[in-house]
Amino acid sequence: MDNFLKYFYSDFGNIFKKFVALLKAIWSFLGSIFNFPKRMDRIQDHYGEFSVFEWVMMIVVNIILIALIIVAIIFLVKLCKKIFRFRISPKKYDELVKQVRNLQRDLLRANYEKDKLLAMKVATLSGDSSVLKELEAEQEPTDGEKTEETDESAILNKNRNTFESPCVDPSESRFFRLTTIDNLYKTQYIEPVYNNTITLAEFCEQFRNFAASKLKLYYDIDMMRYFMASLGTTRIIILQGISGTGKTSLPYAFGKFVQKDTTVVSVQPSWRERTELYGYYNEFTKKYSETEFLKAIYESNYYRDPHMVILDEMNIARVEYYFAEMLSILEMPRQEEWKVDIVTAVWDNDPCLINHGTVQIPNNVWFVGTINNDDSTFAVADKVYDRAIPIDLDSRADAFECEDTPPVIVSTDHLNQMFAQAKQDYPMSEEMENKLEEVNAYIIKAFRLAFGNRVMKQIKEFVPCFVACGGTEIQAIDFIVAKKVLRKFESLSLGFLKEELTKFNSYLDKVFGKNTMKICKEYVEYLKKNN
């Protein structure tokens, strides 16, 4: 033991002495720096022999020394702050760890739900029913989820909510707004008495006078006929033109005229997918984020009045992105197939009209998009224009005097019946069909473009409706050819085709007559001037 103590004293004693010597050296170093009286004595011993340059050097050296001292002090203070800032109690540390784990679990759930939604979308587009069934099965809560998430198990009632069943408390449903609509129509709604004697021509005239007398909105009678004939042709109408010409006001006035207010949906620049229109189920709140668009479609199933949904500034985002699903749905031949997928599994207290997770798009809804063609907007794709009827509002009509005209209450059934009757009573003449075939052949030869089957179908439906509204066949042909066929000329290199455009106007005079097809000719002249 004595030998070990001798070793320990010899080795570690030497280390301790060196450590003490190091501390003394540090203390001596600090003392020499901060012993200002001693340093002043040294300066006094030598300053009498200093030249001017040496005085400057002495001042510079001392300034550098002071700066180094200040930097060292700041560094030590920051280091101490950093050390003491991250010293937390073990209890608080455990709480933070628990919160991090909960957030990680919630993130995994959100990613899993996102993957399921994407898979559902792909399966829907591809028609793979097996994938949809798998997703519906996965959507059902497991036993572990039932014990952990009691709010879900409480919602799953035994009996499905129907129109005949008692009202559901909206706060207990994941669809608050749609459930509120259910309760309103279960308890308060009384169907109005509809005017089923009005004709399309009378409707256009009264609509124009109502807008002027009640709303101080003035439109040409032909504009009203274009608008109404478009309703009988397609479910999508595009109103385009400069600001302040009444693009949004026209469908708004229609809603006031038929006493069923128009729904205005303001499109946002960030819209890129279907959830912007139809909403989504929030896994964190266990509620469905309902949009004004979804609410309008859902509520329209409860009444027979015509209803319009305005997509205001629809091309401020890419229409073919967020509206693609609706474009495909409205192409379905049978109206029973017009359904939008909302959820994968239906709960007992979900709204009455959600069947198998879908909402029906009724036949009393029309979608009206307003478009501004400027640098802040996107160009509308051809697939959108092909399915819609575009109407240009480039100028405001002059004010006129008219009688005070009351609104009307007309059912969609009567409106659709008038459109169907018009197509029987005023079919496009065989002579006009032959002329259109000639024009089609000329356009194919001169411009490498064609009408297309969809466009021809729309022309044959638009013309009878326009005639029933009080217009003429040649007016309808002039309008629909300009908007549906000549619009495609914008995709051509028109700078090299000005001679062909001039010949085309002459050809229109030859086929239809010199004093006809004014809209087409004006549009061709516009293309020549601006290209």
Image (spheres, rainbow, N blue to C red):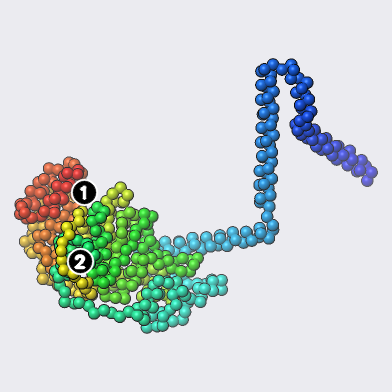
| Distance in Å between CA atoms under marks 1 and 2 | 39 Å
Q: Is residue 519 left or right of residue 155?
A: left
Q: Nearer the viewer, residue 121 or 418?
A: 418
The amino acid type, in three-letter code, at marker 2 is: Ser
Q: Residue at 22% of width from left, 48% of height from top?
A: 491
Q: Position of residue 444 (x, y in %)?
A: 15, 51
**Residue at the extreme right:** 2
- The image quarter in which residue 213 lies: bottom left
Mark 1 vs 2: CB contact within 8 A:
no
The quadrant of the rendering that contains the C terminus is top left
Residue 337 spot, x, y in % from top left: 29, 70
Number of residues whose C-alpha sits closer than 10 Å to that of mark 2, classed few (under 14), some (14–19) or many (20 or more): some
Label 1 neighbour load within 10 Å: few <14, some 14-19, many 20+: few
Sequence-first disc among 1 and 2: 2
Where disc 1 sits, the SS reads: helix
Q: Position of residue 234 (x, y in %)?
A: 22, 64
Residue 233 appears in view: no
The label nearer to you, 1 versus 2, is: 2
Give, as a three-letter code, the residue at label 1: Glu
Instruction: Name the residue: 78% across, 35% down.
Output: 26
Q: Is residue 145 visible?
A: yes
Reply above or below: 65 against 312.
above
Residue receiving disc 1: 490
Residue pointed to by mark 2 = 213
Please state the horizontal and vertical placement of residue 286, each as a whole percent of the image: 48, 69
In the image, residue 514 above or below residue 9: below
